Image: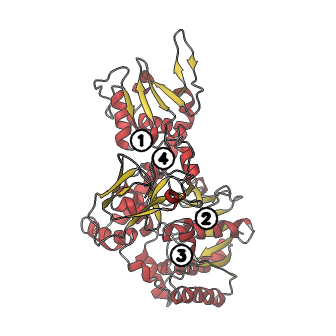
């Protein structure tokens, strides 16, 4: 008889009697333990269970064996089985995505199908406390704000408007002891459970599982965190994973509170346009020009925690995302600092911020605006040679591209463990996708240009590296592999562009 105390902890307040649950099961230890735990408690909780497995087609026979294992597991317990086979490498290449991103996009798109087609009320995934710790640490190293440090949410609501299949995180109101469940959900009831507890449970009940060989591949950032950095941190604090999970919970609650405060305060703090003599405000109606203002005295009265968020939210309303250092520059421009100490600032001083945002101090206000920027196409759209030409470029390294009239230089902030593949400087093509900082989905280049308030004049020069576009003129892009190595790309004009 199995000892009762080895049953992994389950956040059962996410579940309610009569809920139809599709268990996302890869065949790995975490998802197999979730399946067995829900089986153990389904009568007590009143659940109706099924099993869902996606064969990503990444590891050939190994992937097929995983699918067969999960199918047999469902059959052993007489559970309905949902199988979806996809070609993730082909999808990643077609959409110019990384393999992990393409797999996640396909997986969550399928989850949404299962929910909207009525196969389940909720999909449960086996994210654990270890996964939470790795996610928080990863985002901390990248420089996240509190919403990033919130990590993996226990509850997600599938977003039907998102064509990529990604889900939208909710403020975890579904954590109420009697949650409302009218909407299709994705739940993570294992977030307080560790992998040690999970493997102990599976050994105790004699339940085998499948090991994914890619989990040992330290070319993936998450695997390096799991196998190298977290064990090192554990030498300083054996409870580091739990502490990072606690940080996620605190950040999630803090972010929920501050978002509520911003919703309440922003309408009275953010002023449209610019002040005019005699009172009132003038709104600039020129195409591509948007502006907001904040009274400096109002900003001065705010706690620094709120003041930073107000500035960041104001930039967000203008389509820009600011880093911590840029927020500090704005505070300094107002004669403020994070500790509310006044520093010298001059009226009329202007700052150029990220994402095309500009700031100007007036005697009474801080004004933020996005002016229309001039950006001519680097490629001649009527020149088929320039549109088709490609230049190989070493990383790090540089290349002169006469067809585009530029010299491109790439440098790295971190020494790579091995030599890196070359990048390709080429003209943009239909179907190209890019990721903007803090964006949830990949965008067409035309949409990225629109959000950056730039003229839509493809084809443009783009730098493609390891299946992703990591640089295009005038628009900051996000790439995990570029972030890992702190890739910086700089463009300078050639004296006289010529055709090759």
| 358 or 329, nearer to the observer | 358
Which quarter of the picture shows residue 67?
bottom right
How packed is label 2: few (under 14 Cα within 10 Å), some, or many (20 or more)?
Answer: many
Which label's residue is closer to the chain start, 1 or 2? Answer: 2
Residue indicated by mark 3: 89
Could you give the CA–CA distance between mark 3 and mark 4, rounded to whole angstroms? Answer: 36 Å
Q: Nearer the viewer, mark 2 or mark 3?
A: 3
Task: Tell me if mark 1 has few (under 14), some (14-19) or many (20+) residues whose alpha carbon lies within 10 angstroms of its own.
Answer: some
Report if residue 88 is visible in the image. yes
Q: Earlier in the sequence, mark 3 or mark 4?
A: 3
Closer to the N terminus: mark 2 or mark 4?
2
Report x, y in % for residue 249: 45, 55
Residue 458 x/y as whole percent: 55, 51
What residue is shown with label 2?
Answer: 186
Look at the numbered discs 1 and 4 and tell me whether their residues touch, using CB distance below 8 Å.
Answer: no
* 432 or 413: nearer the viewer: 432
Q: Is residue 75 above or below residue 214?
A: below
Relative placement, left or right, of 431 versus 229 is right
Q: CA distance from mark 2 to mark 3?
A: 25 Å
**Helix, strand, or loop for circle 2?**
strand
């Amino acid at each position: 008889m199995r000892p009762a105390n080895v049953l992994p902890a389950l956040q059962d307040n996410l579940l309610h009697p009569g809920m139809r649950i599709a268990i996302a099961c890869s065949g790995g230890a975490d998802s197999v333990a979730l399946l067995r735990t829900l089986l153990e408690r389904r009568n007590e909780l009143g659940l109706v269970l099924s099993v869902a497995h996606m064969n990503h087609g990444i590891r050939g026979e190994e992937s097929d064996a995983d699918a067969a294992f999960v199918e047999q597991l469902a059959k052993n317990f007489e559970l309905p089985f949902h199988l979806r086979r996809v070609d993730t490498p082909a999808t990643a290449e077609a959409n110019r995505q990384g393999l992990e991103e393409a797999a996640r996009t396909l997986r969550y798109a399928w989850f949404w199908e299962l929910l909207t087609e009525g196969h389940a009320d909720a999909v449960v995934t086996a994210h654990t406390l270890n996964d939470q710790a790795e996610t928080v640490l990863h985002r901390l190293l990248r420089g996240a704000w509190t919403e990033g440090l919130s990590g993996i949410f226990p509850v997600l609501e599938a977003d039907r408007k998102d064509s990529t299949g990604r889900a939208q995180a909710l403020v975890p109101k579904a954590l109420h002891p009697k949650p409302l469940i009218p909407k299709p959900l994705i739940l993570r009831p294992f977030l307080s459970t560790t992998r040690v507890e999970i493997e102990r449970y599976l050994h105790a009940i004699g339940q085998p599982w499948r090991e994914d060989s890619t989990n040992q591949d330290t070319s993936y950032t998450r695997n390096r965190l799991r196998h190298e950095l977290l064990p090192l941190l554990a030498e300083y604090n054996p409870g580091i994973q739990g502490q990072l999970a606690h940080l996620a919970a605190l950040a999630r609650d803090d972010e929920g509170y501050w978002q509520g405060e911003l919703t309440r305060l922003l309408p009275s703090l953010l002023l449209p346009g610019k002040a005019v003599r005699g009172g009132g405000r003038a709104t600039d109606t020129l195409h591509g020009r948007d502006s907001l203002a904040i009274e400096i005295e109002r900003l001065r009265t705010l706690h620094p925690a709120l003041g930073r968020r107000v500035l960041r939210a104001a930039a967000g309303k203008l389509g820009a995302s600011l880093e911590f250092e840029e927020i500090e520059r704005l505070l300094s421009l107002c004669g403020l600092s994070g500790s509310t100490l006044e520093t010298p600032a001059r009226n009329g001083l202007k700052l150029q911020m990220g994402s095309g945002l500009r700031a100007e101090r007036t005697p009474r206000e801080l004004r933020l605006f996005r002016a229309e920027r001039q950006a001519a196409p680097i490629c001649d759209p009527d020149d088929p040679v320039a549109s088709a030409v490609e230049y190989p470029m070493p990383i790090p390294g540089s290349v002169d591209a006469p067809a585009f009239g530029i010299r491109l230089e790439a440098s790295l902030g971190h020494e790579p463990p091995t030599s890196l593949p070359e990048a390709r400087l080429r003209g943009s093509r239909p179907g190209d996708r890019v990721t903007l900082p803090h964006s949830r989905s990949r965008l067409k280049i035309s949409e990225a240009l629109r959000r950056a308030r730039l003229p839509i004049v493809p084809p443009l020069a783009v730098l493609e590296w390891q299946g992703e576009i990591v640089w295009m003129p005038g628009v900051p892009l996000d790439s995990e592999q570029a972030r890992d190595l702190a890739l910086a790309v700089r463009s300078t004009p050639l004296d006289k562009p010529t055709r090759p």
